[in-house]
Each structure stands twice: as C-alpha cells, then as structure tokens.
Image (cartoon, helix red, strand yellow):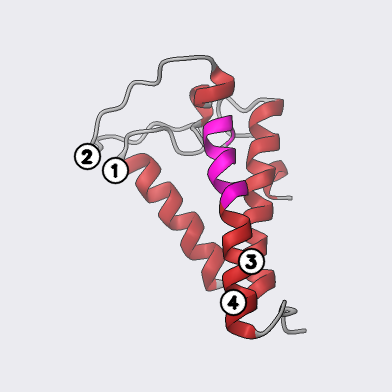
Amino acid sequence: MFGALHAANPGATVVSVLGVSLAGVWLALGYVLTGELAIPIGAHVSWNFFLGPIYGFPVSGNRVSPSLVRVQEIGPDVLTGGRSAPRPAWSGSRPCSSGASPSSATSRRATGGSRSPPR
C-alpha cells in the first residue's frame, strides 16, 4: 500500500516502488511491534526531513531547496535512487532492512514479545 501511494511520484519506477514498499514494511513494523502510530509517523517525517532539507536529496521525487548540505549523486540509478531519492534504491533499502532486526529485538526485549495493535 505504501509503495502504491508513492507510485505517482515524479521519476517513480518499478524499482523505486519496490524500494518504497520495503520502507513501508519497515514503517509498519514499528507500529506492529509497539502499537504506537507515532513510531512510523516519526520515522517517516524524520527520514523526509533529513533527506531533503538537511542532505539535499529529492523527497518523493521532488527537490527540496535550499538544503544544509549540497549533494550530487553519482552512479547508476539502482544505487543512487535517481530522481526518486535514495530510499527506493539499494542505498536506501539497506538501512531499512538492516534496521528491522535490531528494532524488532529491542521491542521484544522491552515488551516481552511481539505486541499486536489494539483493535
């Protein structure tokens, strides 16, 4: 669902939608493990804030300027994300997937197991 909502972003490709879908799983994990919607909302806002206004990367395919740091992406789109930003590329997918295990372990240790969202 998260990937589908980002499919209309400027410069979106099949690879970028798959990468954004992976980010959606990572964000959903924050909610599923804690039952707190603030976790994925905070992670998403923080990611977009640091990606655009701080580091100068495009946010959802849109350039944000000015930024604190000027960045020029060099390399193939599959590594840099091209016009879509690093999140849907290998460089953005890797932090999402590698951050899921420690997040899950920390949550389970703190709550004594996986917590289901309230109904």
- Looking at the image, do the residues carrying marks 2 and 3 touch, with CB atoms under 8 Å apart? no
What amino acid type is highlighted by mark number 1? Ile
Q: On residue 68, which mark appears?
A: 2
Q: Which of marks 3 and 4 is in front?
A: 3
What amino acid type is highlighted by mark number 3? Ser
14 lies left or right of 9: right
Residue situated furthest top in the rendering: 75
User: What is the spatial separation of the Cα atoms under label 3 and label 4, in whole angstroms?
Assistant: 14 Å
Helix, strand or loop at label 3? It is helix
Depth check: give the residue in front, 48 or 26. Answer: 26
Q: Circle 4 is placed at which residue position?
A: 36
What amino acid type is highlighted by mark number 2? Leu
Helix, strand or loop at label 4? It is loop
Q: Earlier in the sequence, mark 2 or mark 4?
A: 4
User: What is the spatial separation of the Cα atoms under label 4 and label 1, in whole angstroms?
Assistant: 27 Å
Q: Circle 3 is placed at which residue position?
A: 104
